[in-house]
């Protein structure tokens, strides 16, 4: 039967059969199962060490008498404070009464004596065996085992699985067998799915061996089976998500050599630790950052398993919304939102994998794909931004009279929207900008001057600039920037209309003005286009390290000037026009006149025009030199 199953696997996915055949040796299976069982026994015995025996103190949580003693102590503390106040009152010269003072001192001594006796019983005497709540201890014991196994599953599957996948592809690349796989008639999806299912199969075996104890401990801890199943579904989806991006990272980062798996698995480890802390201590989920938190299974653990992660509070995911839809109110809809969040990322990474696997030199995303990708990102960002909550409180009523305000909600998330979209645009510049050889091919065969205005809009040049993969990326970057800023521009225009309560949430309208705010967005677009032009120009260089050089240079252009201005104490308040030419021009908008902002925009347009003239000249020269070399070769 096992041979028939293996034959069926080989017929369905030859790559999976190859991975299983190379890894599932008898010795490997025995060692893996043995280690998994040993770890389970160790976890069980570690928790069993706290079993309440004969010397279990009266103050322990599982002693039935403990609650009554603590309640009495709380009452005594209050009575002691009241009696002490009376003693202080009758000890004062103005109301001195020796009779009452003696009575209250005697009462205080009796109360303190009772406190001492109770504390002695709690901390010096042992709880009677018949008063120990063993059933509650076992329930909590199973909870701890379940939580420990759940956390271990997440770290083992995501960190170790990521490492194994990237290390496997790196080894295949060094041996040359990856090129052999590219030439096989199998589809890209078949090969890569075979990798995902086969390479970490030892990790899967460890987890599968521990699944019975995981399920038993969860049910024994009185956790609903539907919650356990939901966690398993989320964990499987997260594995597929992280494994897919691990494969893509391995395909696009060959220059890291043997450091690839350590870098990627380390990044996943840091991400998991960060989200574990956020899930344990941070309950605010009404912000744009939530989409990133939901990529970790830990956030869902706090929702599904009550206060296993949070010591004093429940998860706030029951209040989660997406475009105001209260999806957190229902388990099915919340799991669906998680899967949708994973699904968007999985869809796009597999688009990139299918492009990159066969041709290692092609871009991971085409221009027309980038427009839809940016649109999906805005859908995710704004979906988690637009959540209803009582987020605005009147500053004159000390936290009272709180209500929802759309302008305040967007303003609170503006930094997140800018940072995520800035990273998105920076990534698109790198992905969409073709290198020297592609520009040469495009220039030699496709580039031509268009002087007639009507012909320009119908020309193949413009069509190629928007959709072609070998043409410069500047037009595509502009289109993507317009998709990104369109919602922000709409908000800037309609923000005063949305201010129904006439509060201070949009004081920036009076301080800055909508015109300057729109000009600030235009400054951001123009500065971004300057960076994109510089990247495209640098990718035309003949040096083999032009990609790394372009990324490093733009990183310096984007972040070094603001850092220098900050170190020199050149603040946006006193030197606003200087900041208008930085990566973050909006910080200097408020203290700049409208005409100054407009002139700064005009100056950036001039710089952008000059850079594009130089870029066009470089493209022509590259095409001409390539044509001459081609003719000389003949």
Image (cartoon, helix red, strand yellow):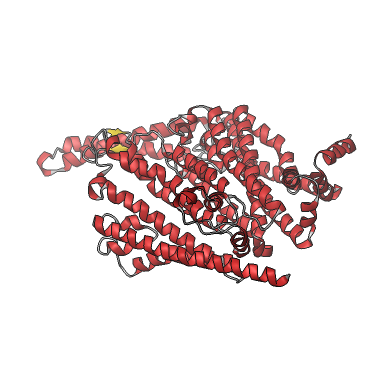
Q: Based on the displayed image, in which of its 4 quarters is residue 492 positioned?
A: top left
Give the tally of numbered discs: 0
- Residue in the picture at 67% in, 43% down: 45
Q: Which image quarter holds the N terminus? A: top right
Q: Position of residue 433 (x, y in %)?
A: 55, 58
The image shows residue 456, relative to residue 228, as above or below, that is below
Q: Is residue 525 left or right of residue 126?
A: left
Nearest the eye: 28 or 330? 330
Q: Nearer the viewer, residue 82 or 337?
A: 337
Q: Is residue 324 above or below residue 446?
A: above
> Which residue of the protein is positioned furthest toward the front in this rendering?
452
Quadrant in which residue 81 is drawn: top left
Quadrant where the C terminus sits is bottom right
**Residue 37, image x and y in percent?**
74, 43
Q: Is residue 62 visible?
A: no
Q: Horizontally, is 204 left or right of 467 in the view?
A: right
Q: Is residue 568 visible?
A: yes
User: Could you tell me which residue is drawn at 22 percent across and 46 percent down?
Assistant: 510
Residue 388 found in image quarter: top left
- Percent across and percent down for residue 179 are 77, 57
Task: Give 77 or 378, whichever is nearer the viewer.
Answer: 378
Residue in view at x 70 percent, y 52 percent? 357
């Amino acid at each position: 039967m096992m041979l028939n199953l293996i034959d069926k696997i080989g017929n369905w996915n030859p790559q999976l059969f190859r991975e299983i055949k190379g890894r599932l040796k008898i010795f490997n299976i025995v060692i893996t199962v043995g280690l998994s069982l040993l770890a389970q026994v160790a976890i069980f015995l570690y928790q069993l060490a706290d079993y309440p025996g004969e010397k279990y103190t009266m103050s322990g949580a599982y002693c039935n008498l403990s609650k009554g003693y603590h309640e009495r102590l709380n009452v005594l503390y209050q009575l002691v404070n009241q009696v002490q106040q009376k003693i202080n009152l009758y000890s004062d010269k103005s109301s001195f009464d020796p009779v009452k003072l003696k009575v209250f001192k005697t009462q205080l001594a009796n109360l303190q004596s009772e406190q001492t006796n109770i504390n002695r019983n709690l901390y010096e005497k042992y709880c009677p065996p018949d008063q120990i709540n063993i059933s509650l201890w076992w329930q909590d014991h199973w909870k701890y085992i379940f939580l420990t196994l759940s956390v271990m599953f997440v770290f083992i599957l995501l960190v170790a699985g990521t490492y194994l996948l990237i290390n496997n592809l790196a080894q295949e690349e060094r041996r040359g067998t990856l090129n052999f796989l590219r030439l096989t008639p199998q589809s890209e999806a078949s090969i890569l799915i075979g990798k995902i299912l086969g390479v970490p199969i030892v990790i899967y075996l460890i987890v599968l061996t521990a699944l019975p104890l995981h399920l038993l401990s969860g049910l024994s801890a009185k956790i609903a089976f539907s919650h356990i199943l939901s966690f398993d579904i989320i964990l499987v989806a997260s594995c597929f998500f992280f494994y897919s991006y691990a494969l893509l990272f391995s395909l696009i980062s060959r220059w890291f050599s043997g450091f690839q798996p350590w870098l990627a698995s380390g990044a996943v480890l840091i991400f998991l630790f960060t989200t574990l802390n956020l899930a344990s201590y941070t309950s605010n989920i009404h912000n744009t950052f939530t989409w990133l938190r939901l990529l970790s299974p830990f956030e869902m653990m706090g929702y599904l398993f009550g206060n296993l992660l949070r010591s004093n509070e429940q998860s706030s995911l029951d209040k989660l919304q997406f475009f105001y839809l209260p999806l957190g109110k229902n388990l099915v809809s919340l799991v669906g939102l998680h899967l949708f969040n994973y699904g968007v990322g999985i869809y796009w990474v597999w688009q990139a994998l299918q492009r990159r696997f066969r041709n290692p030199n092609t871009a991971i995303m085409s221009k027309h794909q980038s427009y839809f990708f940016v649109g999906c990102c805005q859908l995710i960002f704004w979906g988690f931004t637009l959540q209803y909550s009582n987020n605005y409180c009147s500053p004159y009523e000390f936290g009272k009279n709180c209500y929802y305000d759309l302008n305040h909600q967007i303003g609170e998330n503006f930094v997140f929207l800018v940072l995520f979209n800035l990273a998105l645009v920076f990534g698109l510049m790198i992905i969409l900008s073709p290198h020297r050889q592609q520009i040469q091919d495009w220039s030699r065969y496709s580039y031509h001057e268009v002087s007639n205005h009507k012909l320009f809009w119908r020309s193949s040049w413009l069509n190629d600039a928007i959709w072609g993969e070998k043409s410069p990326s500047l037009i595509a970057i502009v289109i993507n920037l317009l998709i990104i800023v369109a919602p922000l521009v709409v908000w800037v225009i309609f923000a005063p209309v949305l201010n129904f309560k006439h509060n201070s949430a949009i004081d920036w309208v009076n301080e800055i003005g909508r015109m300057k705010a729109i000009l600030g967005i235009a400054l951001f677009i123009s500065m971004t286009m300057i960076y994109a032009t510089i990247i495209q120009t640098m990718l035309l260089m003949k040096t083999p390290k032009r990609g790394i050089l372009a990324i490093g240079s733009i990183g310096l252009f984007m972040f070094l000037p603001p850092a220098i201005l900050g170190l020199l104490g050149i603040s946006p308040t006193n030197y606003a026009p200087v900041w208008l030419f930085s990566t973050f021009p909006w910080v200097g908008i408020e203290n700049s006149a409208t005409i100054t902002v407009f002139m700064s925009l005009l100056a950036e347009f001039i710089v952008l025009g000059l850079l594009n003239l130089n870029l066009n000249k470089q493209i022509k020269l590259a095409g001409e030199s390539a044509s001459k070399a081609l003719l000389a070769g003949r």
